[in-house]
Amino acid sequence: MRVIELAHERVAFAGKLLADMGADVILVEPPGGAAERHHPPFLNDAPGPDRSLWWWHYHTSKRSVEIDLGAPAGRERLLALIDQADVLIEAEPTRRLADLGLDWPDLATRRPTLIHAALTPFGRGNPASDLPATDLTLMAGGGPVWSCGYDDHSLPPVRGLGDQAANTGCHYAVMSILTALLARMTTGRGQFIDVSIHAALNVTTEGGSYQWLVNGTTVQRQTGRHASIVPTGPTQVQCADGRYVNTGVPPRIPAEFAALNEWLNALGLADQLPEAVFLEMGATWQGPFDLSLIGKDDTVTAVFGAGREALKLIARSISAYDFFMGCQRAGLATGIIYAPEEAFEDPHFRARGFDVPVFHPELDRYIRYPGAPWRMPASPWRIARRAPTLGEHEHELFGPEDS
């Protein structure tokens, strides 16, 4: 499958997802290169068009050509690529491609099987899409930021880093492209995909949008746990080694209470838990543990609370990783809050091959990259090559006379 990507920071992740899954993604850059080549941070803090770590991450496995779409010859070069393409992805201003004679109606006439995906802040038909927009304004306006932050609501919401607005839009774009490819197998025709990043974010707010639309209620931010219309118990605990963990959901079935009680006794901590008797009650509980009775039934509330307090006590007494492994053995969901560089060293991630060495011939060295969050044996993911230098593949795609 061949994909043409018109270089723009808002579609870079869509191209990466497709390229690392095996698509031949051709990155079309303007004269002088895409502006994103100059996104910090840089290798060894030394700026340069081929030294941006942002660029390296988002453009793995792609090929690059340099094309001036403002020139007739440049447009002909793009059309030559599209004549052999399955997909076009772009994030151009809403009228630019139409003004150049390169928009969907023109391309569909020339290449009826083409799938054309356009990502804009508010959709192709909304004039606001051509107004200035940033990751911050899109995340705030779309809704996810409202759910991110702390129990103390005198503090402002928190925007997660990592271009999450564009990345969310790219996920929806890729899902739509894959669906359109399946449809093309039946109809033999491509289609236009209009992705609104704002809309993609608005339906990616967990329960935030749903609660408002259905009940007219507003979820509230909570430290280290899901936003909720009613407060839930704290789950974030600092372990003995200074790292934090999220203890997740406490025990809910007798076997989990029994495993937690056994772990508590093995560590010699049972005497430090005033609620230990309720933990033992949970281990011998008859029938299902009805979470809806928490706060209404004193015994259920006490038993559930004992499980949470036992987890907190254990977490404060041992290292974060020992706590994580102990919870795994007990069948309890929990997670360590890692710094990015710590995640690379986690034995679980390493066992799954998340740490991927990618060779950079211009540096004559391997660089560690984050791998895929999934493993699909029938269609394996891999980084085929490092991000391209500007126009690196002109000769391959156009030949010596035209490169």
Image (spheres, rainbow, N blue to C red):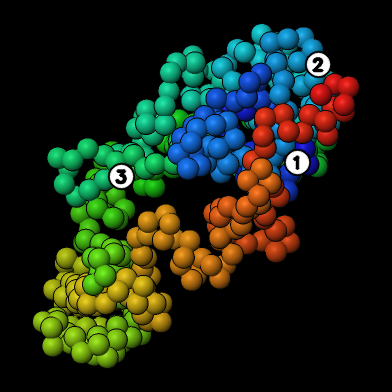
Task: Name which quarter of the figure residue 202 lies in.
Answer: top left
Q: Residue at x 20, y 90 (%)?
A: 268
Residue 25: percent from left, percent from top = 72, 38
Query: Upstream in the sequence, badge 2 or badge 1?
Result: 1
Instruction: Identify the residue position indicated by label 1 in the image.
Output: 24
Assign a secondary structure to mark 2. Answer: helix
For residue 270, above or below residue 323: below
Going by the numbered disc 3, the residue's amino acid type is: Cys
Labels 3, 2: front one? 2
Q: Which mark is residue 148?
A: 3
Q: Residue at x 69, y 40 (%)?
A: 62
Q: Is residue 235 left or right of residue 394?
A: left
Assign a secondary structure to mark 3. Answer: loop
Instruction: Identify the residue position indicated by label 2 in the image.
Output: 76
Assign a secondary structure to mark 1. Answer: strand
Quarter holding the N terminus? top right
For residue 335, above or below residue 64: below
Going by the numbered disc 1, the residue's amino acid type is: Asp
**Residue 183 seen anywhere in this rendered image of the structure:** no
Task: Name which quarter of the figure residue 148 lies in.
Answer: top left
For residue 90, above or below residue 12: above
How many residues crowd mark 1 within 10 Å: few (<14), some (14–19), many (20+)? some
Query: Closer to the camera, 267 or 145?
Result: 267
Q: Residue at x 85, y 21 (%)?
A: 402
Query: Upstream in the sequence, badge 3 or badge 2?
Result: 2
For residue 44, above or below residue 234: above
Task: Name which quarter of the figure residue 131 lies in.
Answer: top left
How many residues crowd mark 3 within 10 Å: few (<14), some (14–19), many (20+)? many
